Image (cartoon, rainbow, N blue to C red):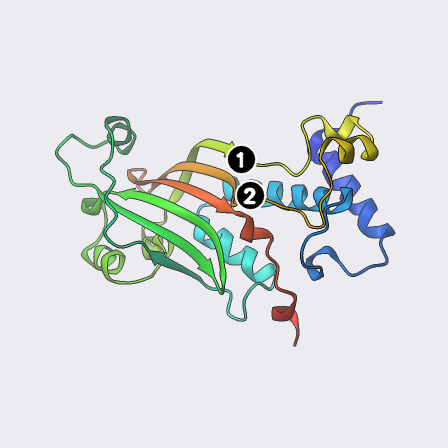
């Protein structure tokens, strides 16, 4: 018999665990339980979002859908909370990735992307204003609109060049270990204690013409798992 891939194992075990459970679904429990099923479901969710971001054209659109699908806010809309007065000049390698010279202007924007009360990601964005319209530049400087929505008319797409997983609720090689062994290796707490940063993406955002528009560094937070049961009630 062929060995199952890790993703196949995750999907199969989650399906089995949910089918056998008579309790409320995991998203209705707060906080997440620190047991094997809770950790397995958290792993499946983190990997699902990671895959959707890698496949998507816009991180903003993916996060907005995530927020809507999991009923995390009455109005599932992503808003960019801009950190004022933060300066981070681009390095030589960044300019090379953006295909610009040493003197061309690059602007920097640091934001927390929030849906309702949940900060889903924190993003650093170095963008080339000369490749945007005056209206887009004005919106980025004066509003809380997410970058992805502002530049949507340019038909942008992303090329991710770095993915760093900061945390996993299960240890490496968990699929070949027993549940008891896994839980002994990770001392059990009352609730699953995920760190603030779960994973990080670095990507180049291109316009529909193929020219790089910006470089982004996005840190996805533990609040992607912060499903609000109250928001789902009619």
Residue 145 occupies quadrant: bottom left
What residue is drawn where x is 18% and y is 56%? 134
Q: Which mark is residue 118?
A: none
Q: Nearer the viewer, residue 188 or 146?
A: 188
What residue is drawn where x is 71% and y is 35%? 186
- Which of the two labelled residues, at mark 1 and mark 2, occupies the earlier sequence position? 1
What residue is drawn where x is 83% and y is 34%? 180
Q: Is residue 216 left or right of residue 228?
A: left
Pick the quarter of the image with the N terminus: top right
The answer to whether residue 46 is above or below residue 29 is: above
From the image, tell me which residue sits under label 2: 195
Q: Tell me the CA gap for discs 1 and 2.
A: 9 Å
Q: Is residue 159 left or right of residue 100?
A: right
SS at mark 2? loop
SS at mark 1? loop
Residue 201 at what x, y percent from top left? 45, 37
From the image, tell me which residue sits under label 1: 166
Residue 33 at what x, y percent from top left? 72, 51
Pick the quarter of the image with the C terminus: bottom right
Q: Is residue 37 left or right of residue 151?
A: right
Q: Is residue 173 left or right of residue 205?
A: right
* Crowd rating for badge 2 (residues with CA inside 10 Å; few <14, some 14–19, many 20+): few
What residue is drawn where x is 72% and y is 37%? 187
Residue 161 occupies quadrant: top left
* Crowd rating for badge 1 (residues with CA inside 10 Å; few <14, some 14–19, many 20+): few
The answer to whether residue 119 is above or below residue 39 is: below
Q: Is residue 207 visible?
A: no
Q: Is residue 217 visible?
A: yes
The answer to whether residue 120 is above or below residue 142 is: above
């Amino acid at each position: 018999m062929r060995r199952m891939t890790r993703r196949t194992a995750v999907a199969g075990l989650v399906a089995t665990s949910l089918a056998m459970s008579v309790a409320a679904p995991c998203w209705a429990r707060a906080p997440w339980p620190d047991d094997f099923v809770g950790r397995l479901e958290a792993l499946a969710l983190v990997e699902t979002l990671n895959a959707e971001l890698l496949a998507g054209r816009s991180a903003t659109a993916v996060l907005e859908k995530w927020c809507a699908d999991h009923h995390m806010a009455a109005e599932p809309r992503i808003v960019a909370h801009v950190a004022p007065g933060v300066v981070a000049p681009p390095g030589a390698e960044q300019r090379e990735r953006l295909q610009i010279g040493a003197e061309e202007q690059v602007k920097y924007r640091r934001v927390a992307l929030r849906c309702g009360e949940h900060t889903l990601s924190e993003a650093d964005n170095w963008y080339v204003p000369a490749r945007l319209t005056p209206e887009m530049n004005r919106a980025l400087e004066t509003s809380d609109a997410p970058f992805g929505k502002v530049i949507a008319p340019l038909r942008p797409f992303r090329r991710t060049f770095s993915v760093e997983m900061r945390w996993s609720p299960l240890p490496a090689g968990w699929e070949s270990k027993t549940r008891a062994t896994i839980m002994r290796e990770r001392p059990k707490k009352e609730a699953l204690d995920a760190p603030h940063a779960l994973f990080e993406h670095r990507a180049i955002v291109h316009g529909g013409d193929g020219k790089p528009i910006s470089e982004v560094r996005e840190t996805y937070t533990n609040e992607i798992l912060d499903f609000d049961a109250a928001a789902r009630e009619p």
